[in-house]
Amino acid sequence: MELEGSVALVTGGAKGLGLTIAHYLQERGAKVIVADLDTEALAALQENMEGCVLDVTRLDDAKTVIKELIERHGCIDVLVNNAGVIYSEAMVNIMNPVGMMHDYHRFRQSITANLDSVFIMTSAVVEQMVMRRTKGVIINISSISACGNEGQSAYSAAKAGVNAMTVTWSKELGRLGIRCNAVAPGFIDSVSTHNALSESIIKHIQSNTPLRRLGKATEVAKAVVSLIENDFMNGVVLKVDGGLTI
């Protein structure tokens, strides 16, 4: 798909990795719409980038917003499911005998934010693609944690689910002209990574990565673009991790 002149929706795109992806798509000629809950970050978007307030975990809200966007723009050609929250909690914490086991409520919250949101947004957008016979592209932002990462039961389970849905949808939707791929970043040098991990853990990750560094958000954005532009890429989960998981 040519990005020039296409309409792209990026969830969680008002800051961080999502904003980098949004900028990268816009630089290549796409009309970019950013969906986010952070109203301050949305207000700070550059003038030629459209923002909309949306809770991606609410199906009715998603359907309403998607319908409004298509009425304004005619279609949505690309959906980037970037919205999500990194969450870490050990399955068993022997240092906290009162609440030793992983909290189920927080488990459900992580699954909803990182897995349900992808299903909800894809459902709302693909429905409109099919109705308008749009040959579109869905890009899901996954994680190498999908393979199982110590201390991330909920997050790993959610990202594994994202990978499974990506492959399933590529098979179901491909015959309708809708491709579905995923990008699975490793550890990216971002605010969310530094908030989620201690500096000692980050140094350990760097020493175990063949390239000896964290990734850059722009490197993930480039992977997103490559999966959009290559029309024979379908059902791919592309790792961008510096060789960490070789």
Image (cartoon, helix red, strand yellow):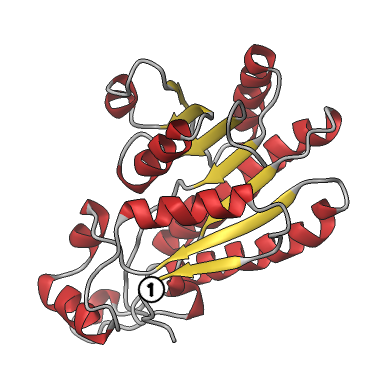
| Residue at point 70%, 64% (across, down) | 235
- Residue 209 position (above or below residue 56): below
On the picture, is 94 further left or further right than 23?
left
Circle 1 crowding by C-alpha within 10 Å: few under 14, some 14–19, many from 20: many
On the picture, is 45 further left or further right than 157?
left
- Residue 86 position (above or below residue 144): above
Residue tagged by mark 1? 152
Q: Position of residue 212 (x, y in %)?
A: 22, 78
Residue 186 seen: yes
> For this rendering, which residue is in front, 61 or 223?
223
> For this rendering, which residue is in front, 158 or 98?
158
Which quarter of the picture shows residue 36?
top left
Q: Position of residue 167 (x, y in %)?
A: 71, 65
Residue 96 seen: no
Q: Position of residue 70 (x, y in %)?
A: 67, 20
- Residue 34 position (above or below residue 20): above
On the picture, is 111 further left or further right than 92?
right
| Residue at point 69%, 36% (across, down) | 124
Q: Residue furthest top?
A: 72
- Residue 243 position (above or below residue 237): below
Q: Residue furthest right?
A: 175
Q: Check the picture and name the quadrant holding the N terminus.
A: top right
Q: Position of residue 238 (x, y in %)?
A: 54, 67
Q: Residue furthest left?
A: 199
| Residue at point 37%, 57% (across, down) | 219
Asked which secondary structure carries label 1, the reply is loop
Which quarter of the picture shows residue 133?
top right
Q: Check the picture and name the quadrant holding the C terminus.
A: bottom left
| Residue at point 59%, 54% (across, down) | 227
Q: Amino acid type of disc 1?
A: Gln
